[in-house]
Image (cartoon, grey):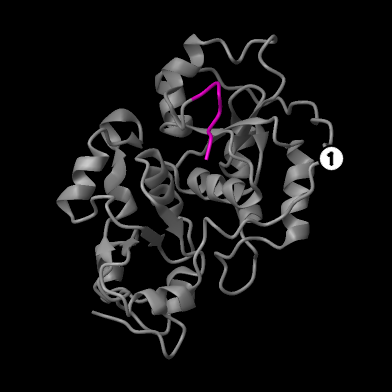
Amino acid sequence: MPYSALLPLITEPEDFLSNGWLTKTRDKNIVIVDLCSEQTYSEGHIPGAYHLAPARTTRGSKPPGLLPELAQLQSIIDDLGLDQTSHIVVYDDEGGGWAGRFIWLLDSLGLYSYAYLNGGRPAWLAAGGELNNETPSPRPKTEFKASINLEPSVEKEEIMFLLGAPGSMQVWDARSPEEHRGEKVLAERGGHIPSAINGNWLDFMDRDRNLKIRLDAKEYLSSIGIHGDKPIITHCQTHHRSGLSYLIGKSLDFDIRAYPGSWSEWGNTKDTPIEI
């Protein structure tokens, strides 16, 4: 899938600033999307950024991590003025979970020209980027009609089928070690999908670099057994934290898909196999 012709998938704030894409003459097709809380957005955001409440990227029913309904997706497209000419720059203030989930949503809409502002709001500020609290003028509504591409996602039935073919895939569990081991239970049942590898999303945020993705992410993944040589399915509790693992997998050119039902579905289903 092609990414933006202008920006790499993981774009450094310093590069974004030096290239001058925040001047009044910037490409009109660049759409900056802020996935911070409404309060944080109102206190200060990247100039020209449009706010998208993270909850709008979810369906709002059980399990909560599912892709929004078509009408919900169309409202996001319309409100942000998106179409296939848009170059979408995404950021949040928590290290990439919501931003990564939104990129998965864009993949599910067939909108592939996007970039993640590495480290989001904290890294932007550390790089000397400015914030303002001005709401940009609405973008014109486009004629782009939402349709759902199922390729970036997997359902529990497919995972159960693949579990019967050892070596056909790897499951990257982005939850905490306590959740993975079944010590912290946030569903009817605790534990993990059989053979799943625990790669806690927090372990991929470099706190010495303002929540940017750790530079040795590929090496760290290899050290825990994820080499990218098999298709990968990633999940967490609601496919929020695994938004970051999805994003990292894509940045490393891994064959990665998301399980949006995540543990809120798997752990609340009576016949799904579980290991502890």
Residue 179 relative to residue 151: left or right? left
Residue 91 relative to residue 132: left or right? left
Question: What SS does tag 1 mark?
Answer: loop
Q: Of residues 146 and 201, which is closer to you in this image?
A: 146
- Residue 131 among magenta residues: no
Whether 7 is drawn above or below 179: the answer is above
> Mark 1 sits on what residue?
143
Q: Quadrant of residue 89?
A: top right
Q: Main secondary structure of the magenta part?
A: loop
Q: Quadrant of residue 160?
A: bottom left
Furthest residue in direction bottom, as rendered: 270
Image x and y of residue 97, in percent: 45, 48
* Quarter the C terminus occupies: bottom left
- Residue 5 among magenta residues: yes
Image x and y of residue 273, in percent: 34, 84
Whether 49 is drawn above or below 177: the answer is above
Q: Which residues are magenta?
A: 1-7
Whether 106 is drawn above or below 273: the answer is above
Q: Of residues 165 and 220, which is closer to you in this image?
A: 165
Image x and y of residue 83, in percent: 73, 37
Label 1 amino acid?
A: Glu
Residues packed near mark 1 inside 10 Å, few (<14), some (14 to 19) or many (20 plus): few
Q: Of residues 113 and 94, which is closer to you in this image?
A: 113
